[in-house]
Image (cartoon, grey):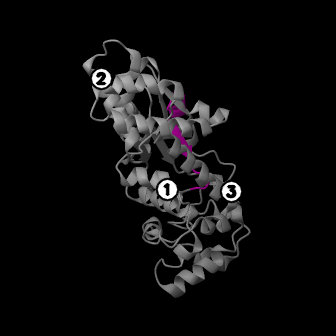
């Protein structure tokens, strides 16, 4: 996150011990690259005096870091960037320090499946900053357990004092492009409580699986046959086909007529789906996958994944 320490933080005549510790924790977070430190060059002198008094052994390195941050800060432009800036005042110092030095949380419906999916996408799309945050433990995943996702998200959000750094990721569970599905209303309620939430454009995470991943599911010949017939689906059908279970005997009311144009052979071959190992296999192949694999499959879905990555990036 982009964080600025208000000038008053460094000009308080007699700061509390907790405030001094809070500043030290934030400076350490800036030093390790956990957050971007936004610095006004005019505030560097006050910072230098503060550091000489309260952290003399670190004063030289932190002042140099502040000067570099001030140059970088001057390069940030645009209202979108400014809206993402957290300005830490003396009154909110300890709260923000607690929040910003705590791991951000990603709540998913299922761990490890959905975690595997996100880790794959983050790697394939070259989201280096997000990947580093996960590797460093600055971001942690939580198992939401399907229907209990909102409750888990709210419990995690309650651990933050001011800046709620929680992102919730839902499958859409939409059976057609027009079907709202059960999770969009849940996401809206969470957003109303200042909790970030993203609902996938496609039915489930498995619907984003590139064909080269599906080719590695089960026996080669059978997988190849399934893929050939999967490609016969219209893009809108491919996006809402049940990749794990295929076609169930009792067709949901929302999908009646949706697949009627499929020939009987295609329906029969795709009847069993691709099973429940798709996300696991995708994760195993993450070093072979690129953004182009997702873009060529579905450009709108690839854009959806970029939006999701950006949402996570803003919260770390």
Mark 3 or 1: in front is: 1
Which marked residue is nearer to the observer: mark 2 or mark 1?
Answer: 2
Q: Earlier in the sequence, mark 2 or mark 1?
A: 2
In this view, 241 is above or below 154: below
Alpha-carbon span between mark 2 and mark 1: 37 Å
Q: Secondary structure at mark 2?
A: helix
Instruction: Describe the element under mark 3 as helix, strand or loop.
Output: helix
Specify whether residue 1 is in view.
Answer: no
Label 1: how many Cα within 10 Å (few below 14, some 14–19, many 20+): few
Q: Nearer the viewer, residue 143 or 95?
A: 95
Q: Total number of numbered labels?
A: 3
Q: Residue at x 48, y 56 (%)?
A: 118
Residue with the mark numbered 2: 53
Q: Secondary structure at mark 1?
A: helix
Q: Quadrant of residue 264?
A: bottom right
Judging by the rendered image, the residue that carries numbered circle 1 is: 128
Nearer to the camera, 198 or 109: 198
Up/down of 258 relative to 70, above or below: below
Q: Residues within 10 Å of mark 3 (few under 14, many from 20)?
A: some
Please state the extent of the stretch shown in magenta in the rendering: 189-203
Residue annotated with mark 3: 300
Q: Can you tell which mark lies on residue 299? A: none
The percent position of residue 243, horizontal first and vertical second, equals: 54, 66
Return the x and y of residue 280 as percentages of the image width and height.
42, 67
x%, y% of residue 143? 37, 48
Distance from label 3 to label 1 (Cα)? Answer: 22 Å
Residue pushed farthest right? Answer: 261
Taking 72 as reference, is 7 left or right?
A: left
Residue at 49% over, 78% down: 216
User: Which comes sooner in the sequence, label 2 or label 3?
Assistant: 2
**Is the residue under label 1 in contact with that under label 2 (CB below 8 Å)?**
no
């Amino acid at each position: 996150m982009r964080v600025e320490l208000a000038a008053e933080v460094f000009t308080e005549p007699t700061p509390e011990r907790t405030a001094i510790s809070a500043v030290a924790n934030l400076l350490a977070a800036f030093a390790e690259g956990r957050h971007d430190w936004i610095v006004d060059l005019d505030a560097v002198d006050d910072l230098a005096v503060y550091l000489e008094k309260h952290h003399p052994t670190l004063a030289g390195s932190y002042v140099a870091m502040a000067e570099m941050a001030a140059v970088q800060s001057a390069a940030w432009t645009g209202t979108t960037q400014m809206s993402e800036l957290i300005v830490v005042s003396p009154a909110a110092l300890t709260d923000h320090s607690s929040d910003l030095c705590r791991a951000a949380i990603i709540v998913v419906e299922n761990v490890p499946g959905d975690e595997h999916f996100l880790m794959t996408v983050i790697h394939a799309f070259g989201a280096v900053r997000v990947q580093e945050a996960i590797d460093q433990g600055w971001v942690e995943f939580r198992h939401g357990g399907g229907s209990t996702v909102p409750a888990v998200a709210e419990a995690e959000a309650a651990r933050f004092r001011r800046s709620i750094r929680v992102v919730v990721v839902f499958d859409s569970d939409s059976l057609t492009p027009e079907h709202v599905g059960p999770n969009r209303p849940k996401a809206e309620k969470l957003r109303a409580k200042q909790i970030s939430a993203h609902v996938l454009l496609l039915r489930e995470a498995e619907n984003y699986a590139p064909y080269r991943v599906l080719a590695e599911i089960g026996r080669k010949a059978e997988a190849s046959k399934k893929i050939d017939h999967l490609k016969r689906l219209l893009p809108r059908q491919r996006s809402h086909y049940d990749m794990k279970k295929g076609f169930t005997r009792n067709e949901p009311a929302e999908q009646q007529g949706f697949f009627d144009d499929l020939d009987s052979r295609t329906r029969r071959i795709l009847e069993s789906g691709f099973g429940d190992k798709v996300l696991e296999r995708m994760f195993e192949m993450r070093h072979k996958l690129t953004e182009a694999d997702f873009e060529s499959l579905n450009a709108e879905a690839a854009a959806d994944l970029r939006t999701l990555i950006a949402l996570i990036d803003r919260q770390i």
